Image (cartoon, rainbow, N blue to C red):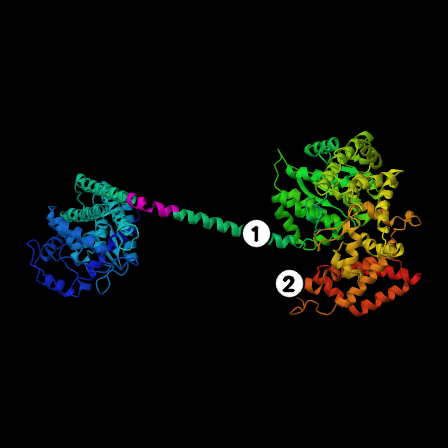
Amino acid sequence: MSPQRLAEGFARLRDRLSTRDRSRQKRNLAEQPTSSERSDSQVQQQPQSQQVSSASIHSTAITATASQNVPIQTEAIEEDSQPGEKPSSKSDLWDKALTHLSKSEYDRDIVAIVKTFTGNPIGDNATADGRPSSTKDLAKDISERMAQAIQDGQHSREQRKWKVTIGDKEYSVRGLVDKTVNVLNKFAAVRFVLVTLTARSELRSQIIFGLAKVTSLILQCDTYRRIYMAPDLTLRPPADILDFLEASIVQTYVKSLLFLGFAIHRQRSKSRMASAPFKINEVESFIESLQESGDQLSRAADNCEKQCNLQNRTGVKELLRYAKESHQSMQTHSVLLIDIHQKMVFDKLRTAEGTAYDSHANEHEARCHPQTRVDLLAQIYKWAGDPDSECIYWLQGMAGTGKSTISRTVAYELSRKEALGASFFFKRGEGDRGKAARVFPTIATQLVRRLPSLMPHIQDAIETDSHIGEMAISKQFENLIRLPLTKMPSNPQNPPTVIIVIDALDECDQEKDIQAIVSLLPQVKQVTSVHLKFFVTSRPEIPVYVEFRRIREPYKDFILHLVDEHTIEHDITAFLNSTLAEIRNKYNIYPLGGQHLPESWPSSTEIHDLVKMAIPLFIFAATACQLIQKGKYSDPEENLNKILERTTGTQISKLNKLYLFILEQLLDDPINSKEEILKRFQEIVGAIVILADPLSVTYLAKLLDISEKKIGHIVGLLPSVLYMPSEKSAPIKPLHLSFRDFLVNRNNHETDPFWVDEKETHKNLAKHCLHVMRGGLRKNICGLSFPGMHRSAVDLKQLEKSMPSQLQYACMHWAYHQTKGDPELSISKEVYSFLTTHFLHWLEAMSLLGRVKECLDALRLLARWVEVCIYI
């Protein structure tokens, strides 16, 4: 315990002294009788702050205290009381201790000394009114004396006759002994013991040890009093427990005061021989008494604590619950803030919606039937699970062989096994789903869900360059995929295996982008934190084939349309048996005319013939089932018979004949002529398969300036080849790319009345786009409060209201359609007229849509297209 705390403990006595009736004190001192041991000089009456006696400390201490016998005042207010405490709470206990001393059988000389140093607040640190200047000053003074006392044990005998400085004056030991008792306040009592310790080193150490013990006990008493006896406590121990604590504190005060009085008395008893030692056993007896008091004090405090714990246990549990809830709330808010920040960062990446295998856009797409592709899927899963296998698996196959169905199945199973990192399903004619610039930003965004530790590294890349999503594909791959993976913490002994699925790579818009993507994939071999692999599917188009042959790293490939015919026959048979049985069961719930289909339908012969037609195209089998279920003839049996009658020839010609058979049913219209039906087909279905991004019935009607009823009618007749969603706001699109290929195939120009002229359709769509923009674009289209407002601050509802989907489509894709159509000078003049009138309006609209980069791309395309127009 530090000496400073000693001073603080005894400072609690000081306030009694400051409230003593000073006039009464002066009177008593003046009338004090002369002691037999006193010299001829009398005590001179001076102001209290200046009282100094030339008598010896020994004679003054004993006689003055005995003769005064002044009761201690208890009304003093303690200067270190805490708010809410009764000011007299500590004074009461000290008063009881002093009262106990006065009535006890202890050595009367020691008791008299105690009364003296507790009744005179005058010392070297006293102010004019008799109060010490500050507790800090006294504590510092006592600390210095105690340190000096300990150090002096190592000094020579001559040095023990040391001088001490108190305040601004220097005193010798003998000089200090000659001072009057008035220098002894409660702090001076301790200080006196220290500065007059001239006994042997052993005795001096005993006295210093006793002072430290007193310090500790006084501080304990004050602490226990505050904790268990303060008047404003919510929880209090029972009365009998408190009584025991109070008695223990009083006893401790008594023993502490007696020790100080004893030490001073023993020093004074040899005033003429100040260096003579007093007996060690007497000191040890008092220290033992202090120890007993301390033990009793500790027991009393323990009893109080146990009682309070019993009362407080419920409250503590409640506090803990609140603390846990608060901590969880803070964690939740912290995570929320982090999530918001990360979302804001990742929102800077332009990703493609609907590209993940489990996105809403792919919700109704089929996966492999459990009895189909069994061997192939097993082989793929084995490759995926082997950390030493090739980093690329290329599944190639001609249109309609079921590549996308296999990809969805693989992605689903890998996701279920927590091995899927990301998936990107290309789709030509569906906006961003055909753009290579969206591949790696989209993959990176999905990858962090599987590998959360990748998040900060990708986040750093985005924050370093917020336009990373618009940079070259190679830089996107480097900064968003490869480098973050190399920085990610790893487990060299067991790195995870992560598969990325890229489906229909051949449907990427640009051939050069396809080649760039393929050339980048082998670089994942450099990554050691994870076993990263790519599962890629595509048609065996020349750009894809050539680039794969350039790869130096080994890769695994599989040609789907070269699978053994027996295996394909088995798989398609299993698919048709299951699907047609389901069609039969659904039809028999509400059969046409009450005629149920027999359980034997379809016959094994019909299944066999249909399988032979379909091999190796799963899309033929799937489209045939769509037609059987939803064809013009509501009876599935009749629809199946029509298919079996009409489709013969090679695999591709059989699929084309199937598509033609489906379309020819449109001509069986008793109301509209063939020419009118074909014209409407070209306008509506031709636009649907050529659109850069699919539109809903409502917005397609507004773009083409055709009624929704007409569009709904013709699309409703083609459910086996066009996806017509039940939600009016969802887009219409072909069920398979092979249907689009069939319609725009130039080889069918002369023989197929449904042939769609691609260039002519693009030109018509461009005209419609220009018309929509002229009618919709204007300055400050969203009514922004001030120019330069960030697009993130624009209300989305206001944006959709001011720029409906047909206008957004026109702004984003008019240049694409314009440059894909036949170049004509007259049309270029229309473009020039639009740009001179609405160029800035178009830029504003594209900015609000976050498509400024597309403006530059469009202008470059238009510049080249205009040059062609000029030279025609």
Rendering quarter of residue 340: bottom right
Where residue 107 appears, x then y in whole percent?
11, 46
Query: Is disc 1 placed on a helix, strand or loop?
Result: helix
What residue lies at 66% left-to-right and 52% top-to-bottom? 462
Residue at the disc numbered 1 = 338
Residue 329 horizontal/vertical position (percent): 49, 51
Horizontal and vertical percent position of residue 213: 25, 45
Q: Does residue 84 appear to the left or right of 361 in the view shown?
A: left
Which amino acid type corresponds to the residue marked 2 in the rendered image?
Answer: Asp
Residue positioned 28% across, 42% down in the render: 302
Which residue in the structure is indicated by mark 2?
A: 795
Whether residue 222 is visible: yes
Q: How many marks?
A: 2
Q: Residue at x 57, y 52 (%)?
A: 338
Mark 2 Cα shell of 10 Å, populated few (<14), some (14-19), many (≥20)? few
Magenta segment boundaries in residue numbering: 306-317
Q: In front here: 843 or 15?
A: 843
The amino acid marked with disc number 1 is Ile
Q: Are marks 2 and 1 in contact (CB under 8 Å)?
A: no
